[in-house]
Amino acid sequence: MFIDADISIKNQKNILLVEDEAIIAMSKLRELGKYGYNSVHALNGEKALEIIEYNEEGIDLILTDTLLRVQR
């Protein structure tokens, strides 16, 4: 299936991206934005839980890295 990169649909879905690699996160956020998704980034699971708890609009989908390092 081919998806046109110039699509201008506003999906109005909120996606939480949990990714500890900045370059990967920026790339994914850019791609999600192209398709009209509202996306939020968290560096780790702890920050993701905070975003979920305080996000008034809710989160429709969580995309996460499978190996997240603990940053202290």
Image (tube, grey):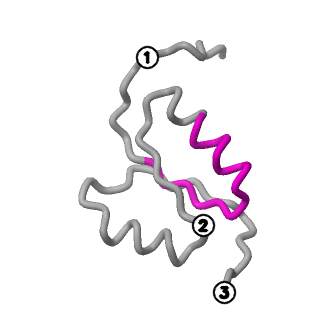
Residue drawn 64% across the image and 46% down it: 26
Q: Residues within 10 Å of mark 1 (few under 14, many from 20)?
A: few
Q: Does residue 17 belong to the magenta stretch? A: yes
Q: Name the residue type under label 1.
A: Ser
Instruction: State whether residue 49 is above or below residue 29.
Output: below
Distance from label 1 to label 3 (Cα)? Answer: 40 Å
Q: Name the residue type under label 3.
A: Arg
Residue drawn 37% across the image and 30% down it: 11
Residue drawn 66% across the image and 16% down it: 1
Q: Position of residue 36 (x, y in %)?
A: 43, 29
**Which segment is the magenta one?**
15-30
Please name the residue that numbered disc 2 is placed on: 43
Please name the residue that numbered disc 1 is placed on: 8
Give the quarter of the image for residue 64: bottom right
Please name the residue that numbered disc 3 is placed on: 72
Q: Earlier in the sequence, mark 2 or mark 1?
A: 1
